[in-house]
Image (cartoon, rainbow, N blue to C red):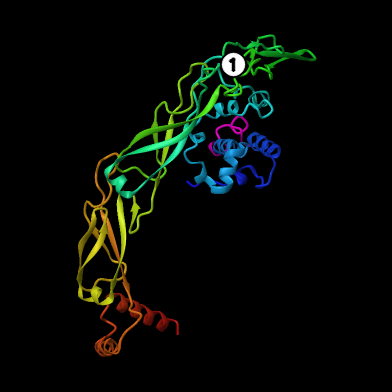
Amino acid sequence: MAKRDYYEVLGVSKNTSEADIKRAYRRMAMKYHPDKNPDDKEAEAKFKECAEAYEVLSDSEKRQRYDQYGHEGLRGIGMRDYAHMNWQDIGSIFEDVFGFDDFFSGIFGGRSRRAGRGGSSRGYDLETTVELTLNDIAKGTEKTIEFTRQDTCPECNGSCSARGTTPGKCPTCGGTGQIASRGGFFQMVSTCPKCRGSGQVITNPCKKCKGTGRVPKKRVVNIKIPRGVHEGQGIRVANEGEPGRKGGPRGNLYCYVRIKPHEFLQRDGNNLIAIVPISFTQAALGTTIDVPSLDGTRGLKIPPATQYGSVFRIKGQGLSDMRTGRTGDELVQVTIETPTKLNAKQKELLREFVKTENKTVSPQSKRFFDKLKKYFGNNK
């Protein structure tokens, strides 16, 4: 499925400011949040779509690439795979949006807060695309994928603090990770907005990662492509996503298949389709023609009296089925071309042919004119 325009997803224009994009994301995320729309798969998909759009449009570098090249410009830069991500994890990615995760937990009952905020957690999945030819799909192949991901900072080893220093106790919550406020007879407890529940603050941030614990890093991996994969299918590469928090396992990388158009062949399931033009004399008299296939050209016998649109099957010349291993066929559909330039001799021969032609020469023509005569005869 083609991705929608990110500006359209958030309902903003291309010259919208960063602050307005943040506000638009908050508004759309509130509208489609799964806690507000229980058991609504469409709302959940839109919630994830909004998060993906915000990741791009809130990042000046990604936004510039997107504005210039569209979705193609984002290939290979380690985009998170929101479609396969648990929606509960999305709030923690954009905690900078006015305490995003806690905002939802306060309104929708606390389900969107990630369990074990202070403990370890699995890293986020990433996605990229891999372009394949029909020959790659027919035989299976191995591709080298290059992408950029956020990796653990080698300077601070992900601690966010400068080497030789440690985080300090959060002055807002006193190191508990929570703050309490009273409202009449009730006491409200929420996650500390300063330390976001960790109980610690970075007093001397690492200069290399600027206190984030992450730095962009280029990565090259080889992936095996099985025979018969389809457009849009994802190939999972385990443990090639972002690193987890506090020693948690890495996420995965999903490589989504994009099929490069073939010059002569189109895919239909496991079959291949070729549309081949022939002349009307070849169709009438029969002939043998060369047709394209994945292995070059091969001969195909065209019988006499072939009609426009006739389909001929070449067994076993399609693609393998991923599950059964069975191979599809190649279907050759012929079209009949009418000559546009005739010399005098050709015209003379055709006029002679017309004198011998009658309406019963073609079964389809006979049926058509019989039906035409019957219809207008009954409607007089």
Q: Residue at x 39, y 31 (%)?
A: 237
For the C terminus, give its image quadrant: bottom left
> Dot 1 surroundings within 10 Å: few (below 14), some, or many (20 or more)?
many
In the rendered image of this protein, does residue 332 appear above or below residue 128?
below
Q: Is residue 290 left or right of residue 76?
A: left
Asked if the magenta segment contains residue 37, the reply would be: yes
Residue 377 position, x and y percent, is: 40, 84
Q: Name the residue type under label 1.
A: Ala
**Mark 1 — residue?**
162
Q: Which residues are magenta?
A: 32-43
Secondary element at tag 1:
loop
Q: What secondary structure do most residues of the magenta stretch adopt?
A: loop
Q: Nearer the viewer, residue 254 or 380?
A: 254
- Quadrant in which residue 137 is drawn: top left
Asked if the magenta segment contains residue 330, the reply would be: no
Q: Nearer the viewer, residue 185 or 253?
A: 253
Residue 225 position, x and y percent, is: 33, 38
Q: Is residue 195 left or right of residue 1?
A: right
